[in-house]
Amino acid sequence: MKITPLSKRLTAYLEKHNIQKSFEKQQFLFEQNPCHASLRTEILKPKHLKIYSFRITQKYRAIFVYCGKSTIEIIDINNHYQ
């Protein structure tokens, strides 16, 4: 699985919240196995929109969409509890 490069906005968000290293670790796991248990990858509701998320930390998640069979684009990173 391949993840497209993050936008400047998302890179800035990672830096602002000091979660760059956690993201890099989870990105590596996702690229090896998108269903790895620590990622907790899930489809978001409503399911017909086909928007997914995976865990960066216990507090933050990456929101993504598929851009083909083996590529995803992360469209947002946010606080899971807001």
Image (tube, grey):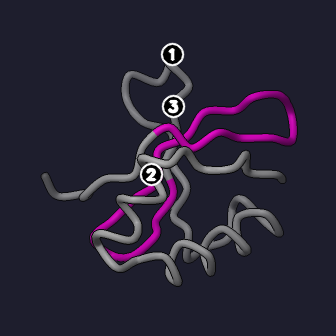
Residue 48 disc label: 1
Q: Residue furthest left?
A: 82
Whole-Å distance between the Cαs marked 3 and 1?
Answer: 8 Å
**Mark 3 against mark 1, which lies toward the viewer?**
3
Residue 30 disc label: none
What residue span does the magenta drawing correspond to?
54-75
In this orientation, which residue lies closer to the viewer: 6 or 49?
A: 6
Q: Is residue 67 covered in magenta?
A: yes
**Res. 29 image quadrant:** bottom right
**Mark 1 against mark 2, which lies toward the viewer?**
2
Of mark 1 and mark 2, the one earlier in the sequence is: 2
Q: Secondary structure at mark 3?
A: loop
> In the picture provided, is 15 more to the left or to the right than 54?
left
**Mark 3 against mark 2, which lies toward the viewer?**
2
Q: Secondary structure at mark 2?
A: helix
- The residue drawn where x is 55% and y is 40% is 64
Q: What main secondary structure does the magenta stretch of the protein show?
A: strand
> In the picture provided, is 78 more to the left or to the right than 48?
left
- The residue drawn where x is 26% and y is 57% is 80
**Res. 13 image quadrant:** bottom left
Q: Which residue is disc 3 drawn over?
A: 51
Q: Which residue is disc 2 drawn over?
A: 10
55 to 65, vertically: above or below = below
- The residue drawn where x is 51% and y is 57% is 54
x, y percent for residue 67? 75, 28
Which kind of residue does numbered mark 3 sit on? Ile
Which kind of residue does numbered mark 1 sit on? His
Whole-Å distance between the Cαs marked 3 and 2?
Answer: 17 Å
Q: Secondary structure at mark 1?
A: helix
12 to 18, vertically: above or below = above
Q: Label 1: few (<14), some or many (≥20) within 10 Å?
A: few
